[in-house]
């Protein structure tokens, strides 16, 4: 089983890129973030023609998440991260597929920091940890896949000081990610590639793609019930270099 996460950065604008990647990479499950489309704007017909079932939670202009499945139809569980009834941003969707639970998430960016946007990011992380703990208590096979908007350690960002004030690498952001992982989750890509950068994001500005000035922001975390099935993991870097590409590349894992 191949599971991928891909911040598509506007699903309708990047639809040709997405369909080309689905056709070549053939993920069994794909988690998408930053759809930038309302529910009725989701290109479900094109996705279905490509051979994928889908569940999604859209939002006009910003945010939006979706889970695609090539074989089994996803059984939707929830479209909201519990813990804050006043939070209406489309950042979380959860479904059961082929015996596992797939959570697709798009964590807040948090900039500028300090400030309310950074506070929201940390609060979202706290809610995610509380929800994730319930999965572990029940010993369920779960993958938490998405754009976490955190480069967890110095190896996850190219050598630079230009991001020092950015919310993506703040000590509190990194501590929040570490606290989640320390519950018992396996950072799949880092587990199999402990010393390589494995970047998944290259900003459009300042020739960062051509300079390989990237960050690893997109992660797949596996519960203890699922981690022993991990075989391979990687990043489809070439997707970032295509015409009209998202500023992210798909990250993926293969499970027994």
Image: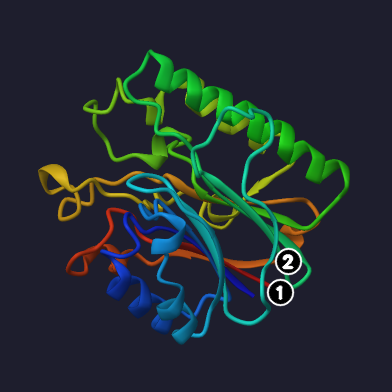
Q: Earlier in the sequence, mark 1 or mark 2?
A: 2
Residue 22 coordinates in the image, percent (x, y): 43, 77
Instruction: Please give the label number shown on residue 229.
Output: 2
Instruction: Estimate the spatial distance between the alpha carbons at disc 1 and disc 2, rounded to whole Å.
Output: 5 Å
Residue found at the far front of this picture: 40
Q: Which residue is mark 1?
A: 256
246 lies left or right of 63: left
Residue 173 coordinates in the image, percent (x, y): 49, 26
Query: Does the rendering let one see residue 72?
Result: yes
Residue 241, located in which quarter of the rendered image? Answer: bottom left
Q: Is residue 55 above or below residue 171?
A: below
Q: Are marks 1 and 2 in contact (CB under 8 Å)?
A: yes
Residue 150, located in which quarter of the rendered image? Answer: top left
142 lies left or right of 238: right
Label 1 neighbour load within 10 Å: few <14, some 14-19, many 20+: few
22 lies left or right of 20: right
101 vs 159, nearest the viewer = 101
Quadrant the N terminus occupies = bottom right
Label 2 neighbour load within 10 Å: few <14, some 14-19, many 20+: few
Residue 170 coordinates in the image, percent (x, y): 41, 22
144 vs 152, nearest the viewer = 144
Question: Disc 1 on helix, strand or loop?
Answer: loop
């Amino acid at each position: 089983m191949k599971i991928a996460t891909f911040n598509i950065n506007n699903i309708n604008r990047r639809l040709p890129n997405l369909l080309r990647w689905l056709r070549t990479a053939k993920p069994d499950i794909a988690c998408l973030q930053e759809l930038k489309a309302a529910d009725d704007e989701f290109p479900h017909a094109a996705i279905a023609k490509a051979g994928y079932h889908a569940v999604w939670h859209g939002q006009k202009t910003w945010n939006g998440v979706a889970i695609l499945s090539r074989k089994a139809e996803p059984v939707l569980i929830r479209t909201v991260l519990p813990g804050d009834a006043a939070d209406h941003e489309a950042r979380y969707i959860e479904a059961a597929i082929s015996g596992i639970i797939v959570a697709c998430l798009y964590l807040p960016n948090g900039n500028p920091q300090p400030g309310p946007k950074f506070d929201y990011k940390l609060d979202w992380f706290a809610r995610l940890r509380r929800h994730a703990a319930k999965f572990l208590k029940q010993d369920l096979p779960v993958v938490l896949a998405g754009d976490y908007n955190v480069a967890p350690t110095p190896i996850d960002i190219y050598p630079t000081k230009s991001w020092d004030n950015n919310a993506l690498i703040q000590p509190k952001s990194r501590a929040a990610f570490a606290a989640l992982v320390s519950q018992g989750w396996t950072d799949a890509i880092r587990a199999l590639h402990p010393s390589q950068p494995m970047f998944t994001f290259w900003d459009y500005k300042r020739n960062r793609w051509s300079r390989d000035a990237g960050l690893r922001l997109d992660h797949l975390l596996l519960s203890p019930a699922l981690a022993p099935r991990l075989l391979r993991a990687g990043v489809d870097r070439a997707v970032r270099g295509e015409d009209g590409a998202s500023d992210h590349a798909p990250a993926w894992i293969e499970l027994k």
